């Protein structure tokens, strides 16, 4: 992003009213109270234009790809447009973008392909902070004689133990698979350094950007990762997975594929017919993000610049809300907070926080809030190793409060008021 675009975006506060008008689901009532969506790490809401794009595709362009007739040709163009939109989102080339059902499915496909070139004695590195979708697909390769090591966390603030991580990257490490941000506690990892360490040891680097994508800009060229996966239902789009792979890696590896599927990139990585209507929705989700950038910095020129400008205002707003939420939570008696709480380090976390409260299970807290229209998650959210490491796995996990840019200070205050009321 040019420094002028950054300055424009930074000079403006997020226009939350404008944002909220675009999301129809935000305006519903639950038991007579306005719904508060603090469930975004499990999936964000979608703007009206995403809903319209899905319906629009099905009304006017519904067909399989590659045919010699209008609806199929429109479908081919739409798929190309979706790839171009994701290329702007990731800062990569269109043929480095692979679509699939969800992040988990794409990661298993990649792990099977990588597994074909591994041999006994090779090692993979995962982390204890991660969602299981970035653990099990790699652990499955142990059946090939591969060893999977796990980088530890510092339990005090739930940050990755970088000493442990770097010590576990060895000369026989073939892949380092790490989350860009932790879906359970919000920690943002130093992925630039992790990829650097992986490459210095001759290893590939895979990043799970599912939790990071709604909160921070992705630049796969700057990070230099070999692969990165995310899911559009976590960044205001429909239920789809998207994989970035460096062109040379996508060419070199051998995915399991049908004979009928070409060897062209990225076709050889895409199995079966894609979810066309959701790809149409994905374009609209990227355009929504870009429009946030254009709304706040009309001078931005390209879609990529507009996307980066949007993240500037998202981050400014989210950090302010995170500060209000975390300060409020820390003042509640009997509350245990998991993760980074030092305001000076808020650039190292997303606005996703996890807590427990004395006298209540996380499920009881989530139910109490849910009855009052406040949506939060309880449990381990598939971050199984972290829940075990923090000693909460067998007692219901944690209550996760996950903010998105469409949330407001008033909503945070409502949640804090409810929790204060429960404190004993
Ligand atoms: C950090 C993280 N990684 C991976 C996943 C799995 O994504 P998907 O549901 O698209 O397979 C999730 C879903 O919650 C997640 O939060």
Image (cartoon, rainbow, N blue to C red):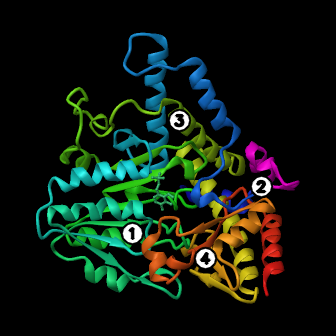
Residue 30, image x, y percentages = 81, 53
Of pointers 1 and 3, the one earlier in the residue sequence: 1
Of pointers 3 and 2, the one earlier in the residue sequence: 2
In front: label 1 or label 3:
3
In the depicted structure, whether residue 384 falls above or below residue 273:
below
How many angstroms separate mark 4 from mark 2 (CA)?
A: 21 Å
Towards the viewer: 395 or 272:
395
Identify the residue at image location x=53%, y=35%: 278
Q: Residues within 10 Å of mark 3 (few under 14, many from 20)?
A: many
Q: Residues within 10 Å of mark 2 (few under 14, many from 20)?
A: some
The answer to whether residue 322 is magenta is no
Residue designated by label 1: 192
Circles 1 and 2: CB distance less than 8 Å? no
Residue designated by label 4: 346
Residue designated by label 2: 16
User: What segment is highlighted magenta in the picture?
Assistant: 15-35
Identify the residue at image location x=53%, y=55%: 1
Towards the viewer: 372 or 135:
372
Assign a secondary structure to mark 1: helix
Of pointers 4 and 2, the one earlier in the residue sequence: 2
Of pointers 3 and 4, the one earlier in the residue sequence: 3
Residue 180, image x, y percentages = 45, 65
């Amino acid at each position: 992003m040019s420094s002028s675009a950054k300055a424009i975006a930074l000079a403006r506060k997020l226009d939350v009213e404008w944002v909220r008008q675009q999301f129809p689901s935000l305006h519903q009532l639950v038991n007579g109270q306005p719904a508060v969506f603090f469930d975004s790490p499990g999936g964000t809401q979608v703007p009206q234009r995403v809903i319209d794009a899905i319906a629009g595709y099905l009304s006017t362009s519904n067909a399989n790809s590659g045919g010699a007739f209008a609806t199929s040709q429109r479908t081919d163009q739409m798929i190309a447009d979706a790839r171009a939109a994701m290329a702007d989102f990731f800062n990569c080339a269109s043929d480095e973008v692979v679509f699939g059902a969800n992040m988990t499915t794409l990661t298993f496909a990649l792990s099977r392909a990588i597994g074909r070139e591994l041999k006994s004695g090779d090692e993979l590195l995962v982390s204890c902070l991660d969602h299981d979708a970035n653990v099990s697909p790699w652990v499955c390769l142990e059946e090939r004689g591969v060893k999977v090591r796990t980088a530890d966390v510092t339990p005090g603030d739930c940050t990755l133990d970088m000493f442990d991580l770097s010590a576990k990257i060895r000369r026989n490490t073939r892949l380092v698979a790490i989350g860009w941000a932790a879906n359970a506690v919000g920690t943002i990892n130093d992925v630039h350094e992790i990829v650097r360490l992986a490459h210095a040891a001759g290893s590939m680097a895979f990043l799970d950007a599912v939790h990071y994508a709604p909160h921070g800009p992705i630049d796969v060229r700057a990070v230099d990762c070999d692969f990165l996966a995310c899911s559009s239902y976590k960044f205001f789009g429909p239920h789809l997975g998207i994989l970035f792979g460096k062109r040379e890696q996508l060419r070199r590896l051998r995915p399991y594929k049908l004979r009928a599927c070409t060897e062209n990139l990225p076709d050889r990585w895409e199995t079966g017919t894609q979810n066309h209507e959701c790809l149409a929705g994905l374009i609209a989700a990227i355009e929504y993000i870009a429009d946030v950038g254009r709304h706040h910095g009309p001078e931005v020129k390209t879609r990529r610049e507009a996307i980066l400008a949007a993240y500037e205002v998202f981050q400014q707003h989210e950090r302010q809300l995170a500060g209000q939420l975390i300060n409020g939570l820390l003042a509640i008696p009997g509350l245990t907070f998991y993760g980074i709480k030092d305001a000076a380090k808020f650039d190292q976390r997303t606005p996703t926080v996890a807590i427990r409260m004395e006298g209540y299970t996380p499920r009881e807290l989530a139910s109490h809030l849910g009855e009052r229209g406040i949506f939060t998650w309880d449990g381990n959210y598939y971050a199984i190793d972290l829940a075990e490491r923090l000693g909460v796995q067998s007692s219901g996990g944690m209550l996760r409060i996950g903010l998105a840019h469409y949330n407001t200070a008033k909503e945070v205050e409502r949640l804090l008021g409810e929790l204060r009321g429960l404190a004993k």
